[in-house]
Image (cartoon, rainbow, N blue to C red):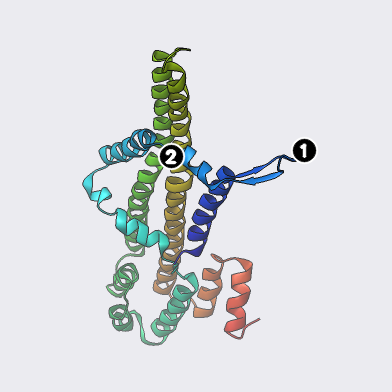
Amino acid sequence: MNITYIVGLIASFVVMLLGMMVGIDIFAEPPAEVFTFTPTAVLNFFDISSIFIVIGCSVAIVVASFPGSILKNIPKHMGIMLNAKKNDPMQYIEQLVDLAQTARKNGLLSLEEKANQQTDPFFKQAIMLIVDANDPDKVRAILENDINCMSARHEDAASLYDKGSAVAPAFGMIGTLVGLINMLRSMSLSGDGASSIGKDMGVALITTLYGCILAHMVFSPIANNLRMRDSEEVLCKMIIVEGIMSIQSGENPKFLKEKLLTYMSQKQRAAAMTSSGEG
């Protein structure tokens, strides 16, 4: 489970609700209270008209902006974002070093068995491309194109939530205009006019609040998390490409490991060297 996302999301809503319920007046004089806590104040921020305008319209526009092939993957997006299991670059580096040692001893053809044991389709494809003795430039071109296409698909997924983040505040402003129009049309200092002013003004302001909440507390974090997952996966695939090309060219396994570790931070490099008994 992606704990940081869950904790951050819950914390943001809790802090917002506390801000709605808690009041502090440091200049209060007795018998007035310095600290007040009014749970029922949360009801002041609930308005069904604002929910229809902001949430309903935002979701409808997102649906209208993307094809069903992307929209049907929303549950998959949530699963990827909430999954704490990350792509581990060190795992790929160790496997590539092992492949390099095998290829150095027994030749590239001996890697076919290793390829069949792979659960990662990209890694398996990369190994088979060099086992089949393809031209190195063509191998790199195929693998890099695969990475670019994958990253483009991931960007399409993240752009869905970017769209939601963009339209939610816009519909918040539309709700504000609706509330102000109703307020002006019914403005009167006599009869029911005075009472409707407060209600219409409330709709005008609450829709803006809902738009900001939906954009910055719901849609935006999802888009950021999906892009982080994409960056992690792209890094691992780049390591695979560089490792496979080095194996095809017959580089020394120890040099290969040093080369691939340059993709990692200094701390990760030190940990890798320590675990392998080097340095």
Return the x and y of residue 71 as percentages of the image width and height: 27, 48
Point out the residue furthest to the left here.
Answer: 68
Q: Which residue is mark 2?
A: 46
Which quadrant of the figure has residue 131? Answer: bottom left
Depth check, front residue: 110 or 148? 148
Nearer the N terminus, badge 2 or badge 1?
1
- Residue 241 visible in the snapshot: yes
Q: In the rendered view of the protein, which quadrant contains the C terminus?
A: bottom right
Point out the residue furthest to the front here.
Answer: 31
Depth check, front residue: 165 or 15? 15
Q: Which residue is mark 1?
A: 29
SS for dot 1? loop
Which quadrant of the figure has residue 262? Answer: bottom right
Image: 147 above or below 181 = below
Amino acid on which disc 2 is placed: Phe
Q: Residue at x 33, y 36 (%)?
A: 52
Image: 21 above or below 144 = above
Q: Residues within 10 Å of mark 2 (few under 14, many from 20)?
A: some
Q: Residue at x 42, y 15 (%)?
A: 191
